Amino acid sequence: MRSLPAIDSLRRAFRWHRRWFAALFAAIAVLAVLNVLSARDSAGVSLVVAARDIPGGVRLTADDLAVVRVPANLAAAGAFPDPAGLLGRTVVTPVPERRVLTESDLLESAGLTGAGKVAMPIRFEDSAAQQLLRVGGRIDILGPTDDGAGYGVVASYVRVVAVPEVAESGLLGGSQAALVLVEVDQTRAAAIAAAAAVSALSFALR
């Protein structure tokens, strides 16, 4: 059976322009893949992650945050879609680079302290020594004793929940000790407050 003239012409054209047709088919394949990836991205959700390792106690800036897209079923509970609401908030635990930030990482979170405990701010006398503190570490808080006759342990084995950075101030660039947050019960909070009203507090590392 003889081929039709039109089919013979197409065959000759294909043989003469093989490379052009190959490039066209490759472009179509790439476009199809891009369309699939675009559809997948549009079906995902935006999440805020740490752009770098963030130490505990740091106030978040735009440089600390990045946004990634992930499938909706992989989104962590309590995650944030937009970094704008995180700026200026304080991280209470170290966050490694690329990890998704959630409410439990932040100072205002309800998960900051355990049941029956409060987060108490304390300003220690030695701002330089304060740099030794780490979120999650345990310390003994030292101050004047109840009778006012000495200096001793006011509260022992206290957990540190936030360590803000030391702020620079003054004409000569001196440093002012920032408030440290510790987890205590009501009884120890009262004892610490009473001691702080009499004299400056210090601490010992556990």
Image: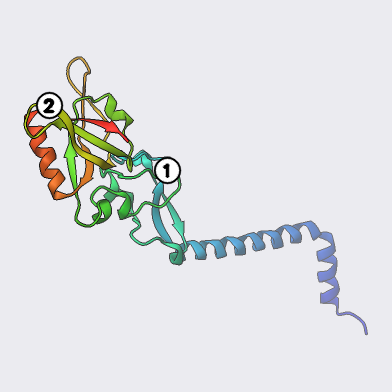
Instruction: Check disc 1 and report its element: helix, strand or loop.
Output: loop
Instruction: Check disc 2 and report its element: helix, strand or loop.
Output: loop
Q: Quadrant of the C terminus?
A: top left
Residue 76 sits in which quadrant?
A: bottom left
In percent of width and height, residue 52 lies at 43, 40
In the image, 204 versus 103, the foreground residue is 204
Q: Residue at x 22, y 41 (%)?
A: 181
Q: Residue at x 83, y 60 (%)?
A: 16
Can you name the residue that lies furthest to the right here?
1
In percent of width and height, residue 17 lies at 80, 59
When the figure is inspected, residue 173 is found, relative to residue 132, above or below; the finding is above
Q: Residue at x 61, y 64 (%)?
A: 32
Q: Nearer the viewer, mark 2 or mark 1?
A: 2
Q: Residue at x 24, y 31 (%)?
A: 203
When the figure is inspected, residue 176 is found, relative to residue 153, above or below; the finding is above
In the image, 140 versus 176, the foreground residue is 140
Q: Which residue is mark 2?
A: 150
Can you name the residue that lies furthest to the top here?
172
Label 2 vs label 1: CA separation? 48 Å
Q: Mark 2: which amino acid?
A: Gly
- Viewer can see residue 163: no
- Viewer can see residue 85: yes
* N-term mark: 2 or 1: 1
Instruction: Give the class, few, some or many, for how many residues have Cα within 10 Å of label 1's Cα (few <14, many ≥20).
Output: some
Q: Which residue is mark 1?
A: 51
In percent of width and height, residue 22 lies at 75, 60
In the image, 20 versus 71, the foreground residue is 71
Q: Mark 1: which amino acid?
A: Ala
In percent of width and height, residue 86 lies at 29, 48
